[in-house]
Amino acid sequence: MNRREFVAGSAAVMLMGFKSPEEFPVVRVAKGKRKFQSPAIEKTIERLSSKIADKELAWMFENCFPNTLDTTVEFSYIDGRPDTFVITGDIDAMWLRDSTAQVWPYIPLAKGAKDIRDLLIGVVNRQVKCILFDPYANAFYKDAKKGEWFSDHTDMKPGIHERKWEIDSLCYPIRLSYGLWKQAGETSIFDEKWYEACLSIFRTFVEQQRLEDRGPYRFGRTTAWSTDTVPGNGYGNRTLPNGMIHSIFRPSDDATVYPYLIPANFFAVVSLRQAAEILVHIYNKKEEAKRFEDLAGQVEAAIYKYGVSKHPVMGEVLVMEADGFGNVLFQDDANVPNLLALPYLGAVEASDPLYKRTRAFVLSSYNPYFFQGKAGEGVGSPHTLENQIWPIGVIMRAMTSNSDEEISAQLKILKSSHAGTGFMHESFDKDDSNKFTRKWFAWANTLFGELILKMESERPHILKKKL
């Protein structure tokens, strides 16, 4: 996304004739033009609509929750196996991260809806193909075309959209597979190809520990944007090997300052242990599983040794990045995995004192990418420069909160910042939510739907009140 690309949302509001909270235009894609339809989705929307007292919030859920299925999926069968290609929205490529996050809230429906189940199996099958094609790539095309970044200075191949190495790109597919197994009882995904991809993930993580050498991955881009390319002759800034895994890029697709990206390493620990459980119970590969467990323990120990530092005001907290030499980055970024989302990912307990101090830092003025203004407050990202609040950050704050008051406050921000469109965006200006980036960003839309479903399950009383 061009960081200067902002949409004037107010014009959209006027065109739609958005006059009052009781009058909401139809903005969801027409039924005949939806990419994928399921009765289970419509029943979920109908059920929630009857439970949400705030009609605008209910309207937003109706638009956002099915947005991934309405607009971004291409489902088919290849050699008799489900295959699902998932674009991010306004970019016609499939990110391993986004594709998992976009379909994650549909997993609970898979147990009773075969169409949803097959769709999700197809996502896993496609992700496995991508990993086996290139475990260092973060985004792929549906076919073997050459995209706009084909000239990047790395081992590009036709079919790869971007080859930015990010730890979370290999964590999210494990998360999806594990979730399908645990929540829907799905095991058909665990075939020989899945096993090969799992071993490829392990090898890549070990290579990027860089305990003996810098590994096979390098990246460079001819660009005016410093965060789109990599220092250190394509390997990133220097580090002291310590057991953590290097991530040359963040989940924002921006280059790291210090390659030990702490939230991503936490995510890797979770994923390695989930993979180990799958290897034991599905494949009966106990020795392989132990290798995964041992690697998880090694990474986790290094996180707590090198990824914790004393902030001069906020006390001892987790940092976003480190280099092993003692240099750290006190910051957070709205893109997940981030420090704020660690309980959401199952990496730490929300009640953990270290996380609570870290959370307080993230949501304070000492985090350089926490913005407050007339339109709301929330975590942003260097990816959209200054003063841009990310709805994903606002949603994640609510998802990781134990406070009704804090959750309600985030819902109010989300309700007041969609600029009359009924959808979430990548970011909005802290003082004017009518200035936003990416009008079609499916991850944020589906995550909003996930938040509302979480409220229905855990805090239904919040939905019974008008915000």
Image: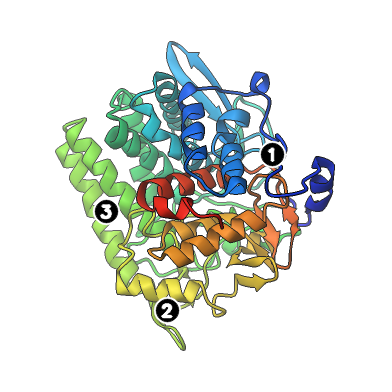
Most extreme residue toward the top is 80
Crowding at label 2, few (<14), some or many (≥20) Cα neighbours within 10 Å? Answer: few
Q: Look at discs 1 and 3 and give the one toward the viewer.
A: 1
Q: Is residue 366 left or right of residue 275?
A: right
Residue at position x 24%, y 37% from top? 278
Give the image location of residue 298, x and y in percent: 26, 60
Q: Is residue 386 shown to the viewer in this render?
A: no
The residue that disc 3 covers is 295
* Count of picture labels: 3
| Amino acid on which the number 1 mark rests in the picture | Asp
Crowding at label 1, few (<14), some or many (≥20) Cα neighbours within 10 Å? Answer: some
The residue that disc 2 covers is 326
Between discs 2 and 1, the one toward the N terminus: 1
Give the image location of residue 186, x and y in percent: 30, 27
Most extreme residue toward the bottom is 312
Quadrant where the image shows the C terminus = bottom right
The residue that disc 1 covers is 90
| Amino acid on which the number 2 mark rests in the picture | Gly
Between discs 1 and 3, the one toward the N terminus: 1
| Amino acid on which the number 3 mark rests in the picture | Leu
Between discs 2 and 3, the one toward the N terminus: 3
Say which element carries label 1: loop
* Measured Cα–Cα span from mark 2 to mark 1: 40 Å
